[in-house]
Image (spheres, grey):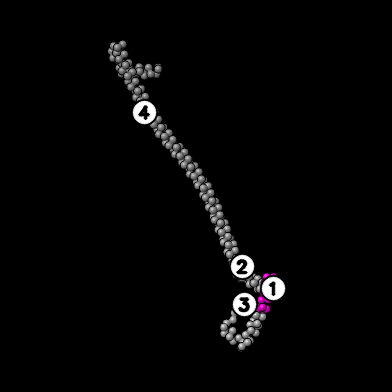
C-alpha cells in the first residue's frame, strides 16, 4: 500500500495522455511488492532472514548478559553478601549472649556455693557461741549454787552449834532441877556443868 501526497501526485503526474502510463507503472510496482510478500512463509522461519535473526539474537543476548553482569548479578550478590554478614553477626551475637549467660550461671553457682559455705560457717559459729554461752551460764549457775550451798552449810553449822549450846544450857538447867528435886539442897553450878559434861562424854 502506498501513500502519495497531492503535491507529489501533481509533480509526478505526466502531461496529457501519459496518465495511463504512470498508472500502469504504479500498478506494476505495487504488484511486484505484493508478489514479494505473498510467499506465505512465517518470517522467523524464512531462511533468508536467518543472518539478521542471528545478529539480533547475539545483540540481544549480549545486551541481557551485560545487564545481568553489570546490574542484576552485583545487586543479587550484594544482597546475598549483606544477608550472609547479617546472619554471621546474628550468630556472633547469639554466641556472645550464650557465653554471657554461661558466665552468669557459673558466677551464680559460685556465689550460691559461697553463700552456702558462709551460712554453714555462720551456723557453726552460732552453735559454738551458743555452746560456749551455755557452758558459761552453767558454770555461773554451778558457782552460784556452790556459794549458796556453802552459805547453807555454814548456816547449818551455826544452827547446829547454837542448838548444841542451847541443848547444853537446857541440859544444865534440867539437871539442876532434877538434882534439886532429888537431893534437896541446890547443887553448885560447877557440879552441874561437870555432870553434864560427864554425861556427854559417856554418850
Q: Is residue 127 left or right of residue 13?
A: left
Question: Dominant secondary structure of the magenta stretch?
Answer: helix
Q: Residue at x 58, y 60 (%)?
A: 87
Circle 3 residues within 10 Å: few <14, some 14–19, many ≥20:
few
Q: Which of the two discs, 1 and 4, labels the residue nearer the N terminus?
A: 1
Q: Residue at x 57, y 82 (%)?
A: 5
Mark 1: secondary structure: loop
The residue where tag 1 is placed is 39
- Residue 102 is situated, as x and y percent measured from the top left of the image, at 55, 52
Circle 4 residues within 10 Å: few <14, some 14–19, many ≥20:
few
**Front position among marks 2 and 3:** 3
Residue 32: quadrant of the picture: bottom right
Asked if labels 4 and 3 touch by Cβ distance under 8 angstroms, the answer is no
The residue where tag 3 is placed is 1
Q: CA distance from mark 4 to mark 2?
A: 119 Å
Q: Which numbered marker is on residue 26? A: none
The residue where tag 2 is placed is 73
Quarter occupied by the C terminus? top left
Amino acid at each position: 500500500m502506498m501513500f502519495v501526497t497531492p503535491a507529489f501526485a501533481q509533480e509526478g503526474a505526466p502531461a496529457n495522455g501519459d496518465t495511463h502510463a504512470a498508472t500502469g507503472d504504479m500498478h506494476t510496482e505495487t504488484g511486484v511488492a505484493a508478489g514479494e510478500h505473498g510467499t506465505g512463509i512465517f518470517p522467523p522461519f524464512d531462511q533468508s532472514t536467518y543472518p539478521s535473526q542471528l545478529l539480533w539474537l547475539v545483540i540481544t543476548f549480549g545486551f541481557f548478559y551485560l545487564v545481568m553482569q553489570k546490574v542484576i548479578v552485583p545487586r543479587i550478590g550484594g544482597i546475598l553478601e549483606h544477608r550472609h554478614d547479617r546472619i554471621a553477626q546474628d550468630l556472633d551475637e547469639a554466641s556472645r549472649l550464650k557465653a554471657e549467660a554461661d558466665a552468669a550461671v557459673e558466677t551464680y553457682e559460685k556465689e550460691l556455693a559461697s553463700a552456702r559455705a558462709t551460712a554453714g560457717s555462720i551456723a557453726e559459729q552460732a552453735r559454738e557461741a551458743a555452746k560456749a554461752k551455755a557452758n558459761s551460764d552453767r558454770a555461773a549457775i554451778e558457782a552460784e549454787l556452790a556459794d549458796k550451798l556453802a552459805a547453807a552449810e555454814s548456816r547449818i553449822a551455826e544452827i547446829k552449834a547454837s542448838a548444841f549450846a542451847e541443848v547444853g544450857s537446857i541440859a544444865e538447867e534440867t539437871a539442876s532441877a532434877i538434882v534439886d528435886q532429888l537431893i534437896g539442897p541446890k547443887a553448885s553450878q560447877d557440879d552441874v556443868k561437870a555432870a553434864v559434861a560427864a554425861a556427854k562424854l559417856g554418850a
